[in-house]
Image (spheres, grey):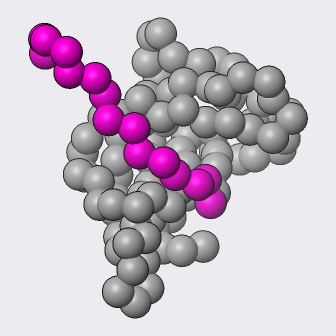
Amino acid sequence: MGGDHQGEVVICKAIDISRSGLRVGVNRQLTVGAILQVGVELSGEDSTLYLAGEVKWCEQGPGDTDLWFVGFEILNANDSDIDTWRALLDEMGQGDEAPQPGPG
Protein backbone atom coordinates (compact mmCIF):
# COMPACT_ATOMS: atom_id res chain seq x y z
CA MET A 1 0.00 0.00 0.00
CA GLY A 2 1.41 3.36 -0.89
CA GLY A 3 0.54 6.76 -2.12
CA ASP A 4 -2.16 8.83 -0.53
CA HIS A 5 -4.57 5.96 0.19
CA GLN A 6 -6.29 6.39 3.50
CA GLY A 7 -8.44 3.83 5.26
CA GLU A 8 -12.12 4.02 4.60
CA VAL A 9 -14.31 4.94 7.55
CA VAL A 10 -17.63 3.17 7.94
CA ILE A 11 -20.02 4.70 10.45
CA CYS A 12 -21.61 2.08 12.64
CA LYS A 13 -23.66 1.58 15.76
CA ALA A 14 -22.76 -1.18 18.20
CA ILE A 15 -25.64 -3.54 18.91
CA ASP A 16 -23.93 -6.17 21.02
CA ILE A 17 -20.43 -6.38 22.49
CA SER A 18 -18.31 -8.99 24.23
CA ARG A 19 -14.62 -9.47 25.05
CA SER A 20 -14.13 -11.44 21.83
CA GLY A 21 -16.39 -9.66 19.36
CA LEU A 22 -19.04 -7.14 18.51
CA ARG A 23 -22.10 -6.87 16.32
CA VAL A 24 -22.71 -3.57 14.60
CA GLY A 25 -25.14 -2.00 12.17
CA VAL A 26 -23.57 -0.30 9.14
CA ASN A 27 -24.81 1.43 6.00
CA ARG A 28 -23.19 -0.93 3.49
CA GLN A 29 -22.08 -4.51 2.99
CA LEU A 30 -18.63 -5.47 4.28
CA THR A 31 -16.49 -8.31 2.95
CA VAL A 32 -16.42 -11.42 5.12
CA GLY A 33 -12.81 -12.16 6.06
CA ALA A 34 -11.70 -8.53 5.84
CA ILE A 35 -9.54 -7.35 8.73
CA LEU A 36 -10.34 -3.77 9.65
CA GLN A 37 -9.48 -1.26 12.30
CA VAL A 38 -12.56 -0.66 14.44
CA GLY A 39 -12.90 2.46 16.58
CA VAL A 40 -15.21 1.93 19.54
CA GLU A 41 -16.55 4.61 21.86
CA LEU A 42 -17.93 3.25 25.11
CA SER A 43 -20.22 5.43 27.19
CA GLY A 44 -18.42 6.85 30.19
CA GLU A 45 -15.01 6.62 28.51
CA ASP A 46 -13.09 9.69 27.37
CA SER A 47 -11.37 8.20 24.36
CA THR A 48 -12.00 5.93 21.41
CA LEU A 49 -10.57 2.41 21.63
CA TYR A 50 -8.95 1.15 18.44
CA LEU A 51 -9.18 -2.58 17.84
CA ALA A 52 -8.38 -4.96 14.98
CA GLY A 53 -11.40 -6.95 13.92
CA GLU A 54 -12.14 -9.62 11.33
CA VAL A 55 -15.53 -9.54 9.61
CA LYS A 56 -16.99 -12.96 10.41
CA TRP A 57 -20.42 -12.45 8.88
CA CYS A 58 -22.48 -9.75 7.17
CA GLU A 59 -26.27 -9.86 6.66
CA GLN A 60 -28.63 -7.32 5.16
CA GLY A 61 -31.24 -5.96 7.56
CA PRO A 62 -34.95 -6.73 7.22
CA GLY A 63 -36.72 -5.40 4.15
CA ASP A 64 -35.06 -3.50 1.34
CA THR A 65 -32.88 -1.26 3.50
CA ASP A 66 -29.36 0.13 3.51
CA LEU A 67 -28.78 -1.47 6.90
CA TRP A 68 -26.31 -4.33 7.25
CA PHE A 69 -25.54 -6.28 10.42
CA VAL A 70 -21.89 -7.24 10.79
CA GLY A 71 -20.12 -9.50 13.27
CA PHE A 72 -16.51 -8.73 14.11
CA GLU A 73 -14.13 -11.05 15.91
CA ILE A 74 -11.73 -8.91 17.93
CA LEU A 75 -8.14 -9.90 17.18
CA ASN A 76 -5.28 -9.86 19.66
CA ALA A 77 -3.19 -7.36 17.71
CA ASN A 78 -0.17 -5.34 18.71
CA ASP A 79 -0.75 -1.59 18.42
CA SER A 80 -4.40 -1.96 19.42
CA ASP A 81 -6.33 -1.22 22.61
CA ILE A 82 -7.22 -4.89 23.16
CA ASP A 83 -6.01 -5.01 26.78
CA THR A 84 -7.99 -1.89 27.72
CA TRP A 85 -11.04 -3.28 25.86
CA ARG A 86 -10.96 -6.55 27.77
CA ALA A 87 -10.42 -4.83 31.13
CA LEU A 88 -13.34 -2.45 30.55
CA LEU A 89 -15.66 -5.27 29.49
CA ASP A 90 -14.64 -7.31 32.52
CA GLU A 91 -15.64 -4.32 34.68
CA MET A 92 -18.97 -4.10 32.81
CA GLY A 93 -19.61 -7.81 33.33
CA GLN A 94 -19.63 -8.69 29.61
CA GLY A 95 -18.92 -12.35 28.81
CA ASP A 96 -16.72 -14.07 26.29
CA GLU A 97 -19.55 -15.24 24.02
CA ALA A 98 -19.21 -13.77 20.56
CA PRO A 99 -22.26 -11.94 19.10
CA GLN A 100 -24.38 -14.02 16.75
CA PRO A 101 -25.81 -13.00 13.35
CA GLY A 102 -29.06 -11.11 13.13
CA PRO A 103 -30.61 -7.86 14.33
CA GLY A 104 -30.54 -8.76 18.01
- Residue at 80% across / 24% down in the picture? 46
Viewer-nearest residue: 77 or 61: 61
Q: Position of residue 12 (x, y in %)?
A: 52, 52
Residue 49 is a magenta residue: no
Q: Of all residues shown, which one is farthest toward the front? A: 4
- Rendered location of residue 62, percent (x, y): 44, 85
Work out which residue is located at the far bottom of the displayed protein and give it.
63
Left or right position of 8 against 97:
left
Q: Residue at x 20, y 21 (%)?
A: 5
Magenta segment main secondary structure: loop
> Which quadrant does the N terminus fall into?
top left
x and y, in percent, of residue 24 in the image: 52, 56
Q: Which residues are magenta?
A: 1-15
Work out whether residue 10 or residue 102 is closer to the camera in this orientation and state it: 10
Residue 87: horizontal and vertical position, in percent? 75, 25
Q: Is residue 70 above or below residue 52?
A: below
Q: Decide if residue 82 is in sight here.
A: no
